[in-house]
Image: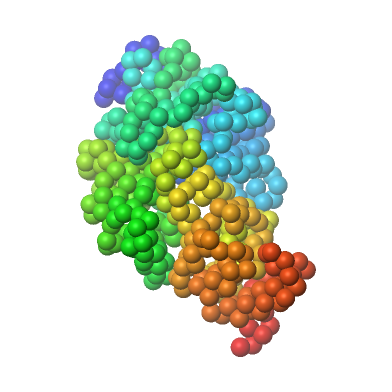
Amino acid sequence: MMMERLQCAELRSRIMTVTQAAALFRDGMTIGMSGFTRAGDCKALPAALAERARHETLRLNLITGASLGNDSDGVMADAGLLARRLPFQSDARLRRKINEGQVMFIDQHLSETVEQLRAGHIPKIDIAVVEAVAILPDGGIVPTMSVGNSASFVAQADRVIVELNTSMPTGLMGMHDIYVPEAYPGRQPIPLTEPDQRIGTPVIPVDPSRIAAIVVTNHPDSPSNVQPPDEDTRAIARHIIGFLEGEVAAGRLSDTLLPLQVGIGTIANAVVHGLVDAPFRDLRMYSEVLQDSAIALIDAGRVSFASASSITLSEPVSRRFMERLDEYARRIVLRPQEISNHCEIVRRLGVIAINTALEFDLYGNVNSTHVGGTRMMNGIGGSGDFARHAHLSIFVSKSVAKGGDISSVVPMVAHVDHTEHDVDILVTEWGLADLRNLAPRERAPRVIECCAHPDYRDELMDYFQRARAQGGHTPHLIGEALSWHERHARTGSMRSEQMACA
């Protein structure tokens, strides 16, 4: 079995224990690790490096594709291993260290990280650690359930360590399409015009002499923790489906729509589940992550092909995926995230982007990252890559959080990730606000009437009317615009005294 996976004979002498491999790292290094939203992440090295950091000075700058699984980010953060982390994370323990200022976190568009590495804006990768299904005779690395930034990490790193994961089926071989753009100047257009095209190679190329160590593991990816659809997310799905039906009726879309991108997380995943029963056919996806909803759409015959950088599934759906891997492999391709999230391709394909907002304001500005404007949640991820360049940029959110103490619709967002210029559609369980071709003064009433929770509508409308009376293209009461956030920080609720007494 090992011969099938480690086909390069000269590398068999480089199999070593994870402790031996961890000894290759030095304080201050910049490390690139595979892993994109809990999929295809390194399983052994994070824990071994954390153990070293508990007993000696070892601080690393860690770059990944997106978030890691198996509590790796939390284990490394607790051990004091992480000096700097980018471009995305979703671990509660690491999040606490970031918000306490103990880990310097750089929140980046996921398409930009390797561009900054190539340009030297980020220190070069000293060691790349990549999870693999197999290593081919020429040293080529076959990734597992994600590609992320791995190909560019391997290309730049002084040394490469491969975690050869025997729990991953060899049937994954051939699912990947590795294409890395040329450096500037002289870069050519990326020749991708359809989601099901393959433009690269099925493996990450590398000279075997640069592979310093191979660590054999047998550990599956962490399962997704997305929750099933509830009445609110089903309502959001109905609003989006009704809107898309209207676009088809108006002749702006056909019943095959355009390629779909769906952000990570429970709300977006649950919303897309609603497309299983929608009157659309032969759908395609051009996304960064495929979640349970993508597999459900493939199973239902609604999606004919899906392109992404990662596959992140719940435990039962993962079992079904592995049992029917040959069938799914014909309909899925995994690419580097700089290709899956590339703005030129998103615009060329006319992607319909559906992403999740923490909050949005009366004019369509969206906060995806910072609670109360200061406390990082996970990061912007790929939502900005898609929102600005999509044919339709849709943001979804439940109208309230924390039992109604927080309104997701506010006078002014406390942190802006996506400006009003990049947002076409806002949706909550109460309705859908189509903001296209509307000036700010026209947007605000529609957002309030369609999206805000009834408990907050009157106060939002009162704010807007008083702001409008003072004038301005985008009316605001500057001294009051962030008062809802201040009220929540002070009392634990955005509810005013009048609302609390009602």
| Residue 157 relative to residue 233: left or right | right
- Residue 54, quarter of picture: top right
Identify the residue shown where x is 70% and y is 68%: 475
Could you tell me residue 429's position as x and y percent? 45, 70
Colour basis: rainbow
- Residue 348, quarter of picture: top left
Could you tell me residue 489's position as x and y percent? 69, 67
Farthest residue in the front direction? 251
- Residue 308, quarter of picture: top left
Farthest residue in the right direction? 479
| Residue 168 relative to residue 446: left or right | left
Farthest residue in the bottom direction? 502
Identify the residue shown where x is 36% and y is 28%: 199
Could you tell me residue 183's position as x and y percent? 54, 22
Which sits in the foreground, 459 or 169? 459
| Residue 103 relative to residue 67: left or right | right
| Visible residue check, residue 288 | yes
Identify the residue shown where x is 26% and y is 25%: 1
| Visible residue check, residue 489 | no
Tally of marks: 0
In this rendering, is residue 279 above or below 136?
below
Which sits in the foreground, 326 or 466? 466
| Residue 296 relative to residue 349: left or right | left
Identify the residue shown where x is 36% and y is 24%: 201
Quarter of the image with the C terminus is bottom right
Which sits in the foreground, 248 or 90? 248
In this rendering, is residue 271 above or below 386?
below
Could you tell me residue 496's position as x and y percent? 67, 79
